Image (cartoon, rainbow, N blue to C red):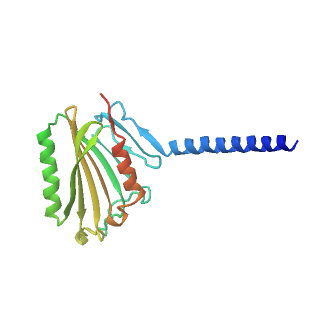
Amino acid sequence: MFKKVTINNTWIWLQVITILWIFGGCRGLSEHKHFIPPEDSNLALEFDYPKEWEWIYKSESSSIRVYDPAYPPVTINSNNEFPRSGLIRLSVINNSNPESMNELISWYVDATQAIGGELVDDKLIDVDGVSARWLTRRIPERRELGQDFEILGNIVFFFTQGKTYEISISVPYDDRDSDFMKGFEYMISSIRFIP
């Protein structure tokens, strides 16, 4: 009888561990949502993103954005204070070509330098089989705008199907290792183009 009880206890423990493993795995799957663009959108891509994000989309525009849930979205107030928050913006330019994308990239580099910023990194990455350019820039404090903190910005550019895509994130430099930044990196890695 002792062996039977031991076998029953072992069987119960195996069932408990299996259930925890199954539900633990399912919990991991629900940490992200899948973005599929609305039918009236110019976006021809889909991706995964953290479930806490709420995308803001207007059908008349060719862009969507999301704010860092750690900082509720605010507007610049009458005291000229720059909001401390994180922002991701995804936009598309239709009827484009690689040359116009390269001009846009040059404009970003020049604008960064014009405001005293620094281009920290400029690299090529692969986005679903398409070569993309990833710029990282560091923007200094701009007290005249009420911005008393540095900003880190990543901008990813790529051209496919006659469209130039620009996906950017801006966060306070101190938040460069935040969950919001990690979510952006995951989002970029999960992009798949819709034919």
Residue at left offset 86%, top offset 44%:
2
Residue at left offset 46%, top offset 44%:
32
Q: Quadrant of residue 173?
A: bottom left
Residue at left offset 22%, top offset 31%:
161
Q: Residue furthest top?
A: 195
Q: Residue furthest right?
A: 1
Rendered-image quadrant of the N terminus = top right
Q: How many marks?
A: 0
Q: Can you see residue 35?
A: yes
Q: Can you see residue 164?
A: no
Q: Quadrant of residue 191?
A: top left
Residue 47 percent location from the top left of the image: 37, 39
Residue 194 percent location from the top left of the image: 32, 30
Residue 29 percent location from the top left of the image: 51, 42
Question: Could you say which is closer to the camera, residue 99 or residue 141?
Answer: 99
In the image, taking residue 169 as reference, residue 124 lies left or right, namely: left
Question: Could you say which is closer to the camera, residue 66 or residue 16?
Answer: 16
Question: Could you say which is closer to the camera, residue 33 or residue 78?
Answer: 33
Q: Residue furthest front?
A: 3
Residue 76 percent location from the top left of the image: 32, 62
Rendered-image quadrant of the C terminus = top left
Q: Is residue 13 above or below residue 110?
A: above
Q: Quadrant of residue 151?
A: bottom left
